[in-house]
């Protein structure tokens, strides 16, 4: 009776190396591992109903550019930068600007709400709606940095990589965008009582 070693899943670095040498299964593993965050990124950055197309195009471009990936940042942040660029391309190609939708934020129920607390659920839904409305009104670059840092929970380095901005710009824009968002939310709260 021989004992076989349990199969250890490949980490991103190993999967990338294998994919760069033509291992299609390794790239498929990367796709499977990062599809959810890529989709969430596309939706939160305003791709709306085109999010699946954006993600698919980002994975295709990622595969084509895989030889250029040097590992200076995580594969995830490198890929999400491609998703962000594809989403920007989508916005440029759209003829209407009112297609910015942040459904993911609105569709994610608040886990802090107790089971049958109807009042709590209504208040949470109102707060979520107010947040989504305020995010929609932010300028695109402010919205992008807020989405990266707080909705996608990217750290500063990953945000720098994803957005392609200098670190100082990420820091200052995050601070200014949060201030704008707080002001909008405070104003909405005053209007709604």
Image (tube, rainbow, N blue to C red):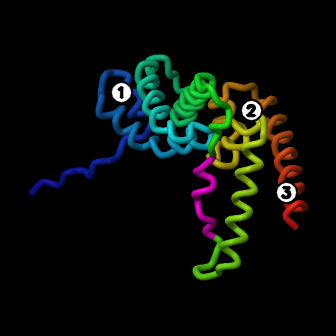
Q: In percent of the image, x 28 and y 48: which residue is there?
A: 7
Q: In percent of the image, x 40 and y 34: which residue is there?
A: 14
Towards the viewer: 124 or 30: 124
Location of residue 101 (image quadrant): top right
Decide which of tag 2 and tag 3 comes sooner along the chain: 2
**Is disc 2 placed on a helix, strand or loop?**
helix
Residue beneath disc 3: 188
Towards the viewer: 119 or 9: 119
Q: Quadrant of the N terminus?
A: bottom left
Image check: 139 left or right of 57?
right
Decide which of tag 1 and tag 2 comes sooner along the chain: 1
Towards the viewer: 42 or 21: 42
Q: Is residue 6 visible?
A: yes
- Residue 161: x percent and y percent? 64, 29
Is 48 contained in the magenta span? no
Residue beneath disc 2: 141
**Is disc 3 placed on a helix, strand or loop?**
helix
Q: Mark 2 to mark 3: distance in Å? A: 22 Å
- Mark 2 neighbour class, 10 Å CA radius: few under 14, some 14 to 19, many 20 or more: some
Residue 54 against residue 107 in the figure, above or below: above
Location of residue 42 (image quadrant): top right
Towards the viewer: 175 or 88: 88
Q: Mark 1 to mark 2: distance in Å? A: 33 Å
Residue beneath disc 1: 19
The residue sitting at the front extreme is: 96
Q: In percent of the image, x 86 and y 44: which residue is there?
A: 180
Decide which of tag 3 and tag 1 comes sooner along the chain: 1
């Amino acid at each position: 009776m021989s004992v076989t070693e349990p199969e250890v899943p490949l980490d991103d670095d190993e999967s990338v190396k294998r994919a760069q040498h033509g291992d299609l299964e390794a790239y498929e593993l990367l796709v499977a591992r990062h599809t959810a965050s890529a989709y969430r990124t596309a939706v939160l950055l305003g791709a709306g109903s085109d999010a699946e197309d954006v993600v698919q195009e980002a994975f295709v471009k990622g595969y084509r550019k895989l030889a250029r990936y040097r590992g200076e940042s995580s594969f995830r942040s490198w890929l999400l930068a491609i998703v962000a660029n594809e989403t920007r391309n989508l916005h440029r190609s759209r003829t209407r600007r009112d297609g910015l939708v942040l459904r993911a934020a609105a569709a994610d129920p608040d886990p802090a709400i107790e089971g049958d607390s109807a009042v709590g659920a209504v208040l949470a839904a109102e707060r979520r709606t107010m947040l989504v409305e305020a995010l929609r009104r932010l300028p695109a670059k402010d919205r992008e940095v807020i989405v990266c840092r707080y909705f996608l929970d990217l750290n500063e380095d990953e945000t720098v990589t994803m957005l392609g901005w200098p670190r100082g710009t990420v820091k200052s824009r995050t601070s200014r965008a949060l201030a704008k968002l707080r002001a909008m939310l405070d104003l909405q709260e005053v209007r709604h009582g």
